[in-house]
Image: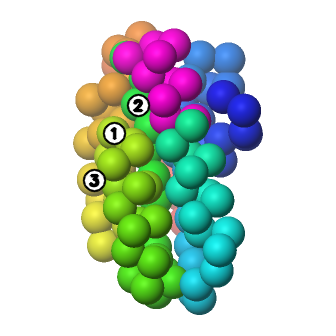
Amino acid sequence: MGKEVDHVVPSRADPHVLIMTSYMETTSSSQTARANEQNTMYERLKASDKSRVFINFVDGAGWLARRSDLEKLYNDCDYIINIRTLGRLEEILCRHIPDRFFTKRPKPQIEE
């Protein structure tokens, strides 16, 4: 896709969910570059395989000051989440990862 993705689930060999993370405390011109770069990545992903999804995890005050770049990130992904909506990630993963990657066995108990 022209750039490494921050996180892939379930694996690099068979990615079904691709996640890019961007946290900006302050503003900079690099935000425009990042938004444009992610636009290219998203277009390549959708051109190659429409079943895979692209998530942008975006947070930080710097994005609020660069609304046009934030809007690009919003438009160029299947889902956008932040620290407040992070709880949706499990639902998104379960929706888009094929059943063959899930186990039917109960989760192991971890003793503390």
Left or right of 90? Residue 11 is right
Amino acid on which disc 1 is placed: Asp
Q: Which tag, 1 or 3, sits closer to the chain's start?
A: 1
Label 1: state its secondary structure. Answer: loop
Residue 42 drawn in magenta = yes
Residue 62 in picture, x, y percent from top left: 51, 83
Most common SS among magenta residues: helix
Please tell me which residue is depicted at 42% across the width and 11% down the height of the picture: 100
How crowded pointer 1 is (Cα within 10 Å; few <14, some 14-19, many 20+) is rated as: some
Labels 1 and 2 touching (C-beta < 8 A):
yes
Q: Which mark is residue 53?
A: 2
Label 3: state its secondary structure. Answer: helix
Name the residue beneath numbered marker 1.
78
Q: Which residues are magenta?
A: 41-50
Amino acid on which disc 3 is placed: Arg
Residue 48 in picture, x, y percent from top left: 51, 13
Name the residue beneath numbered marker 3.
88
Please tell me which residue is depicted at 57% across the width and 35% down the height of the picture: 41
Quadrant placement of the N terminus: top right
Q: In this view of the protein, which residue sits in the foreground, 6 or 87?
A: 6
